[in-house]
Image (cartoon, rainbow, N blue to C red):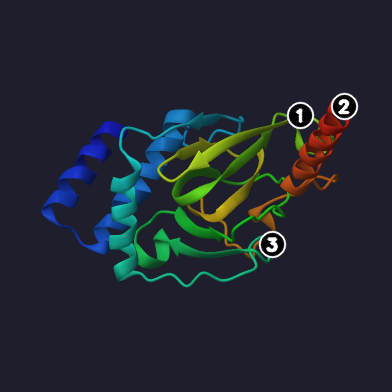
Amino acid sequence: MLQTISSTISAGLLGGISGHESLRLLLDLGRAAIQEVAPPKGGVWATTRSLKLGFPETDGPLVREMVALAENEFPLVLKAPFEQTNSIAGAVWSAQELLDECRDDGFAKLRFDPGTLDLPMHMHEFSDRFIVVLDGEGLFHISSEPLERFTGERIRSIPVKAGDALTFTRGLMHTFSAAEEGLLLLSYHAPLVELDDPRQYTLPKLIWTPRKLQRICQESQGASKSDVR
């Protein structure tokens, strides 16, 4: 499925396609990526926590060109705050509204200011994600701990850069932080839950942000220097 869609994207881009068709193909790519990680059973999206790193059957620059074509036809105005974080701005493409099709998915384009460390670890309980890094660098932080027993003790931080992609199902505890040049993401949502909907994301009782990880690293470096003396 992914290979078929990727071939269609490549052929379409070479032959010249509209922003409308670019958006539809990108949506199809996102849905196929999710299905590869957790195939629907009986028409219901899987709820197990799954994560896949890397780009599915296509490359980042090609997808970025598709995004540019789509944005020429459907301009986005990114607005802050996003998920109550002032250093992140976002805007949404709704497939149902823009393509007039019977589908419930969509994209959010998100811009992280340079050095953003304040987006709390959170979970999407009602939708799955396929995320493309369009520009910049940062870290993708995840935890295997469940929402109700989250302690912040088991955090894995994965470097991400322009051209990388992440696919994960609902139920994964995660967040992002941005490096000095900032971070620009295209996030596919299946289904799309409006950004102001309370179901869009859920926070654990313990609030953990990447800023805490930075403090731990700084304290560790300080202790190492003291040992040397």
Residue labelled with disc 3: 85
Look at the numbered disc 1 and give the secondary structure of its residue.
loop
Quarter of the image for the N terminus: give it: top left
Residue labelled with disc 2: 227
Residue 212 relative to residue 160: left or right? right
Q: Amino acid at mark 2?
A: Asp
Which image quadrant is residue 141 in?
top right
First in sequence: mark 2 vs mark 3: 3
Question: Is disc 3 surrounded by few (<14), some (14 to 19) or many (20+) residues within 10 Å?
Answer: some
Q: Amino acid at mark 1?
A: Arg
Q: Find residue 118 and name its label.
A: none
Tell me whether circle 2 and circle 3 mark residues in contact (CB < 8 Å).
Answer: no
> In front of the other: label 2 or label 3?
2
Mark 1 vs mark 3, CA separation in Å? 23 Å
Which image quadrant is residue 159 in?
top right
User: Compared to 172, does 73 lie above or below?
Assistant: below
Towards the viewer: 105 or 152: 152
* Residue at figure coordinates x 69%, y 53% from the top left: 119
Q: Is residue 182 visible?
A: yes
Position of residue 88 measured from the top left corner of the image (x, y, whole percent): 61, 62
User: Compared to 22, does 222 lie above or below?
Assistant: above
Q: Find residue 154 and name its label.
A: 1
Towards the viewer: 136 or 171: 136
* Residue at figure coordinates x 81%, y 38% from the top left: 216
First in sequence: mark 1 vs mark 3: 3
Mark 1 vs mark 2, CA separation in Å? 26 Å
Position of residue 106 measured from the top left corner of the image (x, y, whole percent): 45, 55
Which image quadrant is residue 142 in?
top right
Question: Is disc 2 surrounded by few (<14), some (14 to 19) or many (20+) residues within 10 Å?
Answer: few
Look at the numbered disc 3 and give the secondary structure of its residue.
loop
